[in-house]
Amino acid sequence: MATSGIESLGPEDIRSHKERYPRVFSRTPRERITSWLSWSAGFLFLLYCMWDIGFFSEKFYGSLGKLAVMLGQMFPPTGWDQFPTFADAILETLAMAFVGSLIGGIAAIPLGFLAAKNMMPIRPVQFGTRRFADVLRSADYLIWGLIFVRAIGLGPLPGIMAIAIIDTGILVVLYSEAIENIDRKQIEGVKASGGSGLEVIRFGVLPQVMPILLTNALYMFESNVRAATILGIVGAGGIGFLLTDNLRAFEFSNACLIILMIIVLVYVIDYLSRILRERYIRGDDYLQGDETQGEGSLIGNIMAKFKKSGS
Amino acid sequence: MTVEAMTVEKQDAVARFEATRSAYNRHKRIYTLLFWSAFAVCLVLSIIQSQFDLIKLANGLPRSTGFIIKMYSALTWENFGADLVDWFWGFDEWAKALATSLMMAFTATVLGTTFGGLLSFVASRNLMEKYWLYFITRRTLEIARTVPDIVWALIFIYPFGVGPLAGVLALTVHTTGAQGKLFSEVNENIDLKPIEGIRASGGNWFEEIRFAVVPQVLPNFLSYTFWRMALNVQAATVMGFVGAGGIGYELINAVKLLYFLDVGAILLMIIGTVFAIDMLSEKCRHYFIGQETLGG
């Protein structure tokens, strides 16, 4: 019997099925040609770009040796006598990211409500706020930094403003999406008990969205720390200025120390932020039967976390 | 059970509930207090360390706004068309530089995704049995990702000289790290049964990857790649700040020379391009995620 199971399918059956359902077995010739043509067009474009940029030039291959020499000069890292200066700049970087993220995170809350479809009935305002946020985040950190350095002067302040602006631009979109996804029933409950517009937001909306807002704000803080490390390239404060300075002066081993410090900073912040997100923002697992986790000190909890994920 | 006993038990339950609740509230209050004090300490230290100064900010804001207004003061209603042409006097040159930025982003995305994609299979705990190889690859990818792309550009400027080559290499290294890490996280969440199937029919490691892993992860890989393309376009617009090619060079020169109108025109072009690429990338991502749900 040809229909009783897969093991009894003969070559005859396969051929007849192939004729009846050709697309199950292979793509049509036309699809194949289209796919083949677009892949080769993409590949040719890539080759053209690489040629135009200079991958196939003598200069490229000649420079590879120079790169190896340079990387060799970077190790071992030196400049430990300047370590306090570097550490101070690293802390400045962190402080810039913190203040900038805080300003951005707070400024984005009212704008996030304006940009949420279920909170802002006037469509042009809602749409306009979103597009405004898109414009804010379309220019890179360094572009905002450059503009503010020119207007305000060198130092960490323009860096903080650049971070705050991009932070606002990205968070408005994330916040408003979180606000659009809330449960309407709690809002209706507050309205039914006679709550005003502000009370609806305070008791009907904020408790629902707060964990999401905080998580997003923390994510942005992580990415802002990375950004703060480079803002010094345009003079907007932080470790980036010392890094550029050392690289321009061909002090590669000093630069190596700075890069290692940046890597450590980013790792530590990512790690702490992950703990905060997973452990302290994710709501009340204390009441949900997991009482042992809620007890004990903050430090004890962090240490327990360390042991768990350190393995 | 008598009525009295039931009442007593009920009261008991209420009392126990109240006790638990007040313990919980006390606990929560202590944590909230601890959290806000830590937060306040961090904030004060940050304000001191970053020399955050409200007066300086209040003085700077009008100047920044004035700066931005000056960038866009070329246009008048009476003479809009001619003003526009006048304003964009350097359009050909800027467009060429912008095209270089786009080509840099494209090349770096393709090369970085290829390298990162290949390495991600080695950097996945569930696919790579040799622990040391997994460990080295994973850490290398993390370093490539953690060092910002513009810092790679500063490094590559020295051996490769000023120009887009250094920028492309910087973006490629960063993309390789970022894609490798994201892809290996995708790989670690796959269904392992198809691998066993390939292994049972005598496939080697490469065949396992090709026929059991790649079909599962490809939609996610593509989605991340479009996202990375948008990020790389944005990054490529500032590579020129350190001399690594693209429109950034034109922008930083105009800012340094205080040609406000040129700054405004170039910024408009950059923001428009980044915006368009962002939308396009979003569309492509939705298209491929849609395909994934259809197929899955």
Image (cartoon, coloured by chain):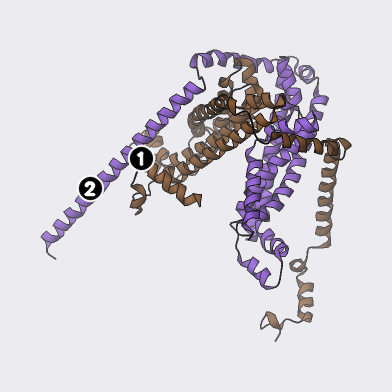
Chain colours: A brown, B purple
Q: Position of residue A269 (x, y in %)?
A: 52, 37
Q: In percent of the image, x 51 and y 34: which residue is there?
A: A112
| Vertical relation: A57 (above or below) B78 | below
Answer left or right for A19 relative to B55: right
Instruction: Tell me the chain of label 1.
Output: A
Q: Position of residue A79 (x, y in %)?
A: 62, 28
- Say which quarter of the image contains residue A250: top right
Does residue B97 show up? yes
Q: Amino acid at mark 2?
A: Ala
Instruction: Tell me the chain of label 2.
Output: B
Q: Quadrant of the N terminus of chain B?
A: bottom left
In the image, which disc is placed on residue A216? none
Which of B135/B176 is in front?
A: B135
Between disc 1 and disc 2, the foreground one is 2
Q: Which residue is mark 1?
A: A190
- Say which quarter of the image contains residue B142: top right
Element under label 1?
helix
Element under label 2?
helix
| Vertical relation: A187 (above or below) B290 | above
Q: Amino acid at mark 1?
A: Val
Q: Which residue is mark 2?
A: B19
Q: Quadrant of the C terminus of chain B?
A: bottom right
Which of B143/B101 is in front?
A: B143
Few, some or many residues within 10 Å of mark 1 (<14, 14–19, 20+): some
